[in-house]
Amino acid sequence: MRNTDTDFDKILDKLVASTRSPRGRYSANESYKLLEPKLKGRKAKIFRIPSILKAAAAILVLGVLSWCIYEYAVPPRMLTISTLADCTTIDLPDGSRVMLNRFSSLSYPKRFGRSDRRVSLSGEGYFSIEKDQKHPFIVEAEELMIEVLGTRFNVDAYSNNPEIITTLYQGSVSVSTSTGEESVVLQPNESAVFNKENHTLLREQSKDTDISMAWQNNNFIFNKTKLTEIARKLSNHFNVDIIIQDLELNDYHLTARFTNGESLEEILTLLQTGRQFNYKKTAKDRIIIYKKL
C-alpha cells in the first residue's frame, strides 16, 4: 500500500520523538525538495547512452554509407556471354530473358544502373523484356540503339551483315542511330532496317514474323529469298565463309523450308538441285557457290 504525505509526516514525528531530531526540516514537502536534485541526476545517468553503443551505431552508419557508395557510385562488373554452335538463353538481373543465336554474344552489367537497363549485342538475339516505366531497356548493336520499356523483339546484328534488322512482335520500340540523326518507332509486325553502307534507317512491314523467329527452333524458312541473304544466314549459323563467285547469282531467289535440323551440306545440296548453281568446299570453313556451266 502506498504511503501519503500525511502518513509520511506521522512517521517523521515518531522518528523525531525517538531521536530528538529537528522536525521542521524533514516534512514530506521539504524532504522531496532535498531529494529531487539527486533523483534528477540519477535519472540522467540511467538513460545516458554508453560510449560503446555510440561507436557501434557509428560503425553501422558508415557500413550503410559504404554499401550505398558501392552500389551507386562504383561501376558494376560487366558480364559477357558468347555462344558457339548452340543457342543460349540468358536471364538478366531484372528478370528479362534473352535467347542468343549461334556465334553471338551479349554483354550486360551484373546489376543494372539507376537510370536504365543497358546491354550490348553482337550477332542475333531474341529479347523478352520485363516492363519498367522508370528504367528503359536499351540494346546497343553496332551503330544502333534500340530502346524499349517492356516488349518482345528480335535483333539481327551479325558483324558481317550489310544490314541490322530489328523486328518487333509485341509492345513498342524506338530504334535510332548512335548519332541520334535518324530514328523510327516500331509497332508489332514491323521491322527497322539499318543499312551500314549508306547509313539509312527504314521502317518496313514484316511479311512473315515466323521467318525471323525460325532460328530459335534451329529451322530455316526462305520465302523468295535472295541467294545472297541465304548465304549470309547459313554463314552466320554454321560459322563458315560462303562466297558467291558469280555476281549474276546474287539476285537469284529461292523458296524452301528446313525444319529437321539439316546439316549445311544437306541444305546446300537440296538448294542447288535443279538450279543454276553449284557449290564446293575449298577449306574447312570456306564454301564457294558458282554458276553451272
Image (cartoon, rainbow, N blue to C red):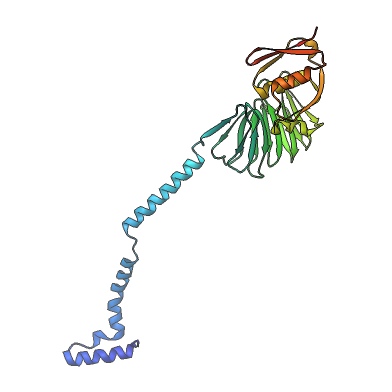
Residue located 17% across and 92% down the image: 18
For the question of whether residue 264 can be seen, the reply is: yes
Residue at left offset 71%, top offset 36%: 153
Position of 250 relative to 45 (above/below)? above
Residue 128's image quarter? top right
Q: Residue at x 35, y 57 (%)?
A: 53
Across and down, in percent, residue 161 comes to 70, 21
Q: Nearer the viewer, residue 133 or 245?
A: 245
Which is nearer the eye, 137 or 19? 137
Across and down, in percent, residue 4 comes to 34, 88
Tell me if residue 161 comes above or below residue 190 in the rendering: above
Q: Residue at x 75, y 18 (%)?
A: 269
- Determine which quarter of the picture holds residue 285: top right
Frontmost residue, 74 versus 121 = 121
Residue 174 drawn at (x, y percent): 72, 35
Left or right: residue 71 versus residue 166 is left
- For residue 253, what is the image quadrant? top right
Q: Give residue 35's position: percent from left, percent from top.
A: 28, 77
Reply above or below: 40 against 9: above
